Amino acid sequence: MSQSFLSRLPLSRFEIDRDHLGRESDGLWDRLWADPGTRILPVFQGSALLAAPDRLALLPVDALPPGDTLTRVYLGRTTTATDAEPAGTAVVAVELEDARHLAEAEWGNLRQVGARLSDRDAGLLTEALGILNWHDSHRFSPRTGEPTVAEKGGWVRRDTVSGLEIFPRTDPAIIVGVTDADDRILLGSNALWESNRYSLLAGFVEPGESLEAAVQREVFEESGVIVGDPVYLGSQPWPFPASLMLGFTATVAADFAGAAQPDGTEILDLRWFSRDELAASLDEIVLPGPTSIARAIIEEWFGSSIRDGQR
């Protein structure tokens, strides 16, 4: 991954030591809750409490009333200092069941604020949402159907009947900047979006499949285009709810002579864009938001950041 491309990936930034040994220690929660330096990151319905439009609100433990917490997860310790928190600050994500006591506060969705946050805050919120989303979908054991309990700082759930330990999982998905012999990029409009929104082709990696094979299969399934030589660019977590987006470029195979045809199910329209054509279309189409790896790949091909105003 080039440093220039890495700098375009807002949700791959981090300034946190996840402290895996601390998760395993006995009495973790008692020590954290007794430490006046511990800070909590409140999360409610997928949004985080903000101190400012570009900064998370990290609160002391006693700032939230008891009884409103669904889940808590030890995120680790910060590796850099801010005006409010020294390096080494322990941070705990707290998913709230009720946020009425914070009704006047400002909340931020990661899609909306991720690109504005500092490296520390972007990493904290991405980590928090990823693990909290996993908790929400694993409150019952897949083996016995019995309730599970959180352990090890919130990084394991245990089946109370069988003793099975359930660990967080991440779903790998590829996303591809496809270009042709004229260096035009292929963008598609998904059936779930408004008709003028265009992005890259993407899809989940299937069991027993390599990333490169997934690139070729997904592009062909969604567009009928055959590509060769996928080249890995970099990755970004996408906790909506649990994906890791693996960015690639790929070129149309030299012996492919057909046209791009949307599959009609997931993709309803496909368009090839030169750089000039994309620039001229920015008032009529909507590109992926600045928090996404799709936007980063498009801008890497484009050669510069694309003007503000694209959502």
Image (tube, rainbow, N blue to C red):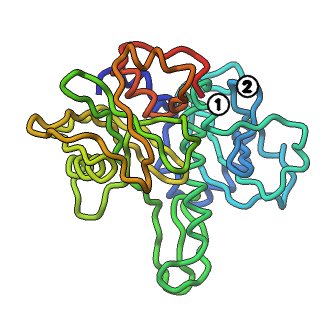
Between 85 and 123, the residue placed more toward the observer is 123
Name above or below for residue 226 compared with residue 65: above
- In the rendered view of the protein, which quadrant contains the N terminus? top left
Residue at the image position 49 percent from the left and 44 percent from the top: 238
Q: What amino acid does circle 1 point to?
A: Val
Residue at the image position 51 percent from the left and 32 percent from the top: 288
Residue at the image position 44 percent from the left and 23 percent from the top: 8
Q: Residues within 10 Å of mark 2 (few under 14, many from 20)?
A: few
Between 177 and 86, the residue placed more toward the observer is 177
Q: Earlier in the sequence, mark 1 or mark 2?
A: 2
Name above or below for residue 56 compared with residue 34: above
Q: What amino acid does circle 2 point to?
A: Pro
Q: Residue under label 2, please give it.
A: 53
Between 205 and 272, the residue placed more toward the observer is 272
* Mark drawn on residue 240: none
Q: How many marks?
A: 2
Q: Which percent across, then down, holds residue 180?
A: 22, 29
Q: Residues within 10 Å of mark 1 (few under 14, many from 20)?
A: many
Q: Which percent across, then down, holds residue 222?
A: 34, 50
Residue at the image position 38 percent from the left and 28 percent from the top: 297
Name above or below for residue 136 compared with residue 210: below
Q: Secondary structure at mark 1?
A: helix
- In the rendered view of the protein, which quadrant contains the C terminus? top right
**Could you tell whether 238 is left or right of 60 in the image?**
left
* Mark drawn on residue 113: 1
Q: Which percent across, then down, holds residue 43?
A: 71, 47
Task: Give the alpha-carbon distance from disc 1 to disc 2, as whole Å.
Answer: 7 Å
Q: What is the quadrant of residue 228 in the picture? A: top left
Q: Say whether marks 1 and 2 touch (CB < 8 Å).
A: yes
Q: Which percent across, then down, holds residue 140?
A: 58, 76
**Could you tell whether 99 is left or right of 138 in the image?**
right
